[in-house]
Protein backbone atom coordinates (compact mmCIF):
# COMPACT_ATOMS: atom_id res chain seq x y z
CA UNK A 1 0.00 0.00 0.00
CA UNK A 2 1.20 3.53 -0.71
CA UNK A 3 0.71 4.73 2.87
CA UNK A 4 2.95 1.85 4.00
CA UNK A 5 5.67 3.19 1.66
CA UNK A 6 5.43 6.53 3.46
CA UNK A 7 5.85 4.85 6.84
CA UNK A 8 8.82 2.81 5.68
CA UNK A 9 10.57 5.88 4.23
CA UNK A 10 9.48 8.34 6.94
CA UNK A 11 12.82 10.15 7.34
CA UNK A 12 13.26 10.59 3.61
CA UNK A 13 9.72 11.43 2.59
CA UNK A 14 10.71 14.84 1.26
CA UNK A 15 12.43 12.99 -1.58
CA UNK A 16 9.20 11.34 -2.77
CA UNK A 17 5.73 12.43 -3.91
CA UNK A 18 3.10 12.73 -1.15
CA UNK A 19 1.73 9.22 -1.58
CA UNK A 20 0.26 9.21 1.92
CA UNK A 21 -1.69 12.39 1.26
CA UNK A 22 -2.94 10.99 -2.02
CA UNK A 23 -4.16 7.80 -0.33
CA UNK A 24 -5.74 9.70 2.55
CA UNK A 25 -7.68 12.11 0.34
CA UNK A 26 -8.73 9.29 -1.98
CA UNK A 27 -10.07 7.33 0.98
CA UNK A 28 -12.00 10.34 2.30
CA UNK A 29 -13.63 10.83 -1.10
CA UNK A 30 -14.36 7.10 -1.37
CA UNK A 31 -16.14 7.21 1.98
CA UNK A 32 -18.10 10.34 1.09
CA UNK A 33 -19.27 8.67 -2.13
CA UNK A 34 -20.33 5.61 -0.12
CA UNK A 35 -22.32 7.91 2.17
CA UNK A 36 -23.98 9.63 -0.77
CA UNK A 37 -24.88 6.25 -2.29
CA UNK A 38 -25.96 5.03 1.17
CA UNK A 39 -23.74 2.00 0.52
CA UNK A 40 -22.98 0.55 3.93
CA UNK A 41 -20.77 -2.32 2.75
CA UNK A 42 -18.49 0.02 0.80
CA UNK A 43 -18.36 2.47 3.69
CA UNK A 44 -17.56 -0.23 6.23
CA UNK A 45 -14.67 -1.58 4.15
CA UNK A 46 -12.97 1.81 3.96
CA UNK A 47 -13.87 3.25 7.35
CA UNK A 48 -11.99 0.49 9.15
CA UNK A 49 -8.77 1.83 7.57
CA UNK A 50 -9.43 5.53 8.03
CA UNK A 51 -8.31 6.05 11.64
CA UNK A 52 -4.81 4.66 11.13
CA UNK A 53 -4.19 6.47 7.85
CA UNK A 54 -5.66 9.71 9.20
CA UNK A 55 -3.44 9.77 12.29
CA UNK A 56 -0.34 8.97 10.22
CA UNK A 57 -1.23 11.74 7.76
CA UNK A 58 -1.84 14.16 10.63
CA UNK A 59 1.59 13.44 12.07
CA UNK A 60 3.10 13.86 8.59
CA UNK A 61 1.35 17.24 8.34
CA UNK A 62 2.52 18.25 11.81
CA UNK A 63 6.09 17.46 10.81
CA UNK A 64 5.76 19.59 7.66
CA UNK A 65 4.39 22.70 9.39
CA UNK A 66 6.43 22.64 12.60
CA UNK A 67 9.18 24.68 10.92
CA UNK A 68 6.79 27.59 10.44
CA UNK A 69 7.71 29.99 13.26
CA UNK A 70 6.17 33.31 12.19
CA UNK A 71 3.59 34.42 14.75
CA UNK A 72 1.07 35.51 12.12
CA UNK A 73 1.10 32.03 10.55
CA UNK A 74 0.40 30.07 13.73
CA UNK A 75 -3.36 29.98 13.19
CA UNK A 76 -2.70 28.42 9.79
CA UNK A 77 -0.43 25.84 11.44
CA UNK A 78 -3.10 24.85 13.96
CA UNK A 79 -5.76 24.55 11.27
CA UNK A 80 -3.57 22.30 9.12
CA UNK A 81 -2.86 20.02 12.08
CA UNK A 82 -6.55 19.96 13.00
CA UNK A 83 -7.85 19.32 9.47
CA UNK A 84 -7.40 15.50 9.32
CA UNK A 85 -9.09 15.10 12.72
CA UNK A 86 -12.00 17.30 11.63
CA UNK A 87 -12.38 15.39 8.37
CA UNK A 88 -12.42 12.06 10.21
CA UNK A 89 -15.01 13.39 12.63
CA UNK A 90 -17.13 14.83 9.81
CA UNK A 91 -17.24 11.52 7.94
CA UNK A 92 -18.04 9.76 11.22
CA UNK A 93 -20.72 12.34 11.97
CA UNK A 94 -22.48 11.77 8.66
CA UNK A 95 -22.34 8.02 9.27
CA UNK A 96 -23.94 8.59 12.66
CA UNK A 97 -26.65 10.66 10.96
CA UNK A 98 -27.34 7.74 8.60
CA UNK A 99 -27.60 5.61 11.75
CA UNK A 100 -30.55 7.77 12.76
CA UNK A 101 -32.14 8.18 9.32
CA UNK A 102 -31.34 4.92 7.51
CA UNK A 103 -30.15 2.02 9.68
CA UNK A 104 -28.64 1.87 13.21
CA UNK A 105 -25.71 -0.20 11.93
CA UNK A 106 -24.11 2.99 10.58
CA UNK A 107 -23.77 4.58 14.02
CA UNK A 108 -22.91 1.23 15.58
CA UNK A 109 -19.90 1.04 13.25
CA UNK A 110 -18.75 4.49 14.34
CA UNK A 111 -19.13 3.60 18.02
CA UNK A 112 -17.40 0.21 17.77
CA UNK A 113 -14.48 1.64 15.77
CA UNK A 114 -13.79 4.26 18.42
CA UNK A 115 -14.24 1.70 21.19
CA UNK A 116 -11.64 -0.53 19.54
CA UNK A 117 -9.27 2.41 19.19
CA UNK A 118 -9.75 3.26 22.87
CA UNK A 119 -9.05 -0.34 23.88
CA UNK A 120 -5.80 -0.38 21.91
CA UNK A 121 -4.52 2.93 23.23
CA UNK A 122 -5.70 2.60 26.83
CA UNK A 123 -3.79 5.22 28.87
CA UNK A 124 -2.78 7.29 25.83
CA UNK A 125 -6.34 7.56 24.50
CA UNK A 126 -7.33 10.44 26.80
CA UNK A 127 -4.34 12.47 25.61
CA UNK A 128 -5.23 11.92 21.94
CA UNK A 129 -8.94 12.61 22.40
CA UNK A 130 -8.22 15.71 24.51
CA UNK A 131 -5.97 17.09 21.75
CA UNK A 132 -8.71 16.23 19.25
CA UNK A 133 -11.21 18.35 21.20
CA UNK A 134 -8.74 21.20 21.74
CA UNK A 135 -7.85 21.41 18.05
CA UNK A 136 -11.51 21.25 17.03
CA UNK A 137 -12.14 24.37 19.10
CA UNK A 138 -10.00 26.34 16.61
CA UNK A 139 -11.83 25.06 13.55
CA UNK A 140 -13.79 27.66 11.60
CA UNK A 141 -14.91 25.58 8.62
CA UNK A 142 -13.75 25.45 5.02
CA UNK A 143 -15.11 25.00 1.50
CA UNK A 144 -14.68 21.24 1.55
CA UNK A 145 -16.86 20.89 4.64
CA UNK A 146 -19.52 23.05 2.99
CA UNK A 147 -19.38 20.87 -0.14
CA UNK A 148 -19.68 17.68 1.91
CA UNK A 149 -22.68 19.07 3.76
CA UNK A 150 -24.35 20.03 0.49
CA UNK A 151 -23.86 16.50 -0.87
CA UNK A 152 -25.39 14.98 2.26
CA UNK A 153 -28.33 17.40 2.18
CA UNK A 154 -29.04 16.49 -1.45
CA UNK A 155 -28.89 12.79 -0.58
CA UNK A 156 -31.41 13.29 2.24
CA UNK A 157 -33.75 15.13 -0.10
CA UNK A 158 -33.29 12.88 -3.16
CA UNK A 159 -33.92 9.73 -1.11
CA UNK A 160 -36.81 11.17 0.92
CA UNK A 161 -35.14 10.31 4.20
CA UNK A 162 -37.28 12.84 6.06
CA UNK A 163 -41.00 13.45 6.34
CA UNK A 164 -42.60 16.87 6.50
CA UNK A 165 -45.80 18.23 7.97
CA UNK A 166 -47.76 21.47 8.22
CA UNK A 167 -48.07 22.39 11.87
CA UNK A 168 -49.97 25.56 11.08
CA UNK A 169 -52.59 25.57 8.28
CA UNK A 170 -51.18 27.26 5.19
CA UNK A 171 -47.86 27.61 6.99
CA UNK A 172 -44.47 26.40 5.80
CA UNK A 173 -43.78 22.66 6.18
CA UNK A 174 -41.46 21.48 8.96
CA UNK A 175 -39.56 18.25 9.47
CA UNK A 176 -41.79 15.58 11.01
CA UNK A 177 -39.84 13.49 13.51
CA UNK A 178 -39.87 12.29 17.10
CA UNK A 179 -36.11 11.70 16.95
CA UNK A 180 -34.50 14.14 19.39
CA UNK A 181 -31.12 14.03 17.67
CA UNK A 182 -32.57 14.71 14.21
CA UNK A 183 -34.67 17.53 15.63
CA UNK A 184 -31.70 19.03 17.48
CA UNK A 185 -29.11 18.75 14.71
CA UNK A 186 -31.15 19.28 11.54
CA UNK A 187 -33.72 21.64 13.01
CA UNK A 188 -37.23 22.01 11.58
CA UNK A 189 -36.55 23.79 8.31
CA UNK A 190 -37.01 21.49 5.27
CA UNK A 191 -34.23 23.39 3.52
CA UNK A 192 -31.86 21.52 5.89
CA UNK A 193 -29.96 24.49 7.25
CA UNK A 194 -28.27 22.28 9.89
CA UNK A 195 -27.84 23.50 13.47
CA UNK A 196 -24.23 22.37 13.59
CA UNK A 197 -21.36 20.83 11.64
CA UNK A 198 -20.96 17.09 11.09
CA UNK A 199 -17.67 16.83 12.98
CA UNK A 200 -19.51 18.06 16.08
CA UNK A 201 -21.70 14.94 16.05
CA UNK A 202 -18.71 12.66 16.40
CA UNK A 203 -17.06 14.79 19.05
CA UNK A 204 -20.20 15.29 21.14
CA UNK A 205 -21.70 11.80 20.89
CA UNK A 206 -18.59 9.62 20.55
CA UNK A 207 -15.33 11.27 21.66
CA UNK A 208 -16.89 12.88 24.76
CA UNK A 209 -17.80 9.44 26.13
CA UNK A 210 -14.11 8.75 26.71
CA UNK A 211 -13.25 12.06 28.36
CA UNK A 212 -13.98 13.55 31.79
CA UNK A 213 -16.77 16.10 31.81
CA UNK A 214 -14.45 19.09 32.16
CA UNK A 215 -12.75 18.16 28.89
CA UNK A 216 -15.90 17.61 26.83
CA UNK A 217 -16.34 19.23 23.44
CA UNK A 218 -19.22 21.69 23.11
CA UNK A 219 -20.73 22.52 19.73
CA UNK A 220 -20.74 26.10 18.52
CA UNK A 221 -24.52 26.50 18.72
CA UNK A 222 -25.03 24.04 21.63
CA UNK A 223 -27.48 21.81 19.70
CA UNK A 224 -26.63 18.93 22.08
CA UNK A 225 -28.51 20.74 24.85
CA UNK A 226 -31.72 19.78 23.04
CA UNK A 227 -31.02 16.05 23.37
Image (cartoon, grey):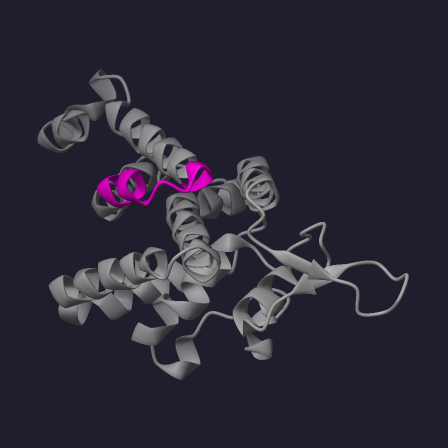
* Image quadrant in which the N terminus is located: top left
Q: Is residue 42 magenta?
A: yes
Q: Position of residue 103 (x, y in %)?
A: 38, 57
What residue occupies the far right of the structure in this picture? 170
Q: Residue at x 35, y 32 (%)?
A: 30
Is 217 situated left or right of 182 in this image?
Answer: left
Q: Position of residue 208 (x, y in %)?
A: 38, 72
Q: Residue at x 79, y 64 (%)?
A: 166
Q: Position of residue 191 (x, y in %)?
A: 72, 49
User: Which range of residues does the magenta coloring cover?
Assistant: 35-46
Q: Is residue 211 magenta?
A: no
Is 105 situated left or right of 8 in this image?
Answer: right
In the image, residue 219 sits, relative to residue 35, either above or below, namely: below
Of 54 and 68, nearer the camera is 54
| Residue 112 visible, this angle | yes
Of 142 and 97, nearer the camera is 97
Amino acid sequence: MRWAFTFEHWDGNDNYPDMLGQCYHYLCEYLMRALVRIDYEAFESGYSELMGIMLLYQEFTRRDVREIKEAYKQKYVVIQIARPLIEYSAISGYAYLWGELVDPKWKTLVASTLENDFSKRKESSEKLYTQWVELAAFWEGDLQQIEWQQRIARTIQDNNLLEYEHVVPLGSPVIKTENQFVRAFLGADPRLMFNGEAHEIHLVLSINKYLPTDKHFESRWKWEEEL
